[in-house]
Amino acid sequence: MEAPFDTKVRHTPVEDILAILLGTLFVGLGVTFYSEAQITTGSTAGLALLVQYATGLPFGIVFFVVNLPFYVLAFLRMGWKFTLKTFFAVGLVSVYPSLMPAWLNISGIDPLFAAIAGGTLMGMGILALFRHRSSLGGVNILSLYLQENYKVPAGYVQFGIDLVILAAALFILPFDRVLLSIVGAGAMSLVILLNHKPGRYMGMS
């Protein structure tokens, strides 16, 4: 007999680990597309990309450091399991972009394709993390907290903050790259908005 729609199935630790590995791999590939096309996104990943473009500092180091303050909110509001999985996910995304050149040789990429495909990949990766009680830190933590406690859709929160970060890109990137970055941020947020709504997904970790 089929389980009722309101039955929540708990993820196993193995399922959580695999979801985090695959989700962060999607995000890492999306970041690589963005870096190759010299575009950015929102959230702390977009902030780290902007710092990389402006200073030359490695994305991974900036991304990891920027997320450190948000672990306090994660621990206080979301619990130690969520915080631990988020720390693991952030660590993987910090490492993946530096490993990508050894795994993937990109001689050229169309910026529009990079924006849409990269944004979609990152959206799917973040979605996998959300559904296994994890995140990429920063804005993701705030988005999940507001959705779970105040029923504000995570996609709306994500996109609103992303627009602020993308506005800062106007001072670093050419205008056409900023427009493409907005397209990519929209693709990423649309994936999250359409697929991560309160009560729709019943899996638990």
Image (cartoon, rainbow, N blue to C red):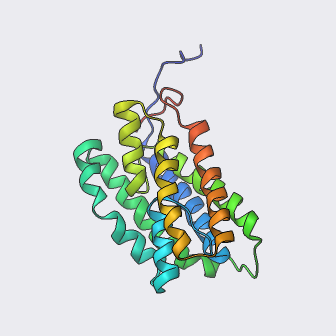
From the top left corner, tell me how far across and down residue 90 is, in percent.
Answer: 41, 63
Q: Residue at x 41, y 30 (%)?
A: 151
| Along the line of sight, the residue nearer the viewer: 55 or 134 | 55
The quarter in which the C terminus is drawn is: top left
From the top left corner, tell me how far across and down residue 43 is, in percent.
Answer: 46, 58
| Residue 10 lies in quadrant | top left
The quarter in which the N terminus is drawn is: top right
Q: Residue at x 40, y 66 (%)?
A: 91
In the image, taking residue 117 as reference, residue 202 lies left or right, namely left
User: Which residue is the extreme one toward the bottom?
Assistant: 56
Q: Residue at x 66, y 63 (%)?
A: 179
Total number of numbered labels? Answer: 0
From the top left corner, tell me how far across and down residue 150 is, in percent.
Answer: 36, 31
From the top left corner, tell me how far across and down residue 93 is, in percent.
Answer: 48, 66
Q: Residue at x 37, y 49 (%)?
A: 141
Q: Is 64 above or below relative to 162?
A: below
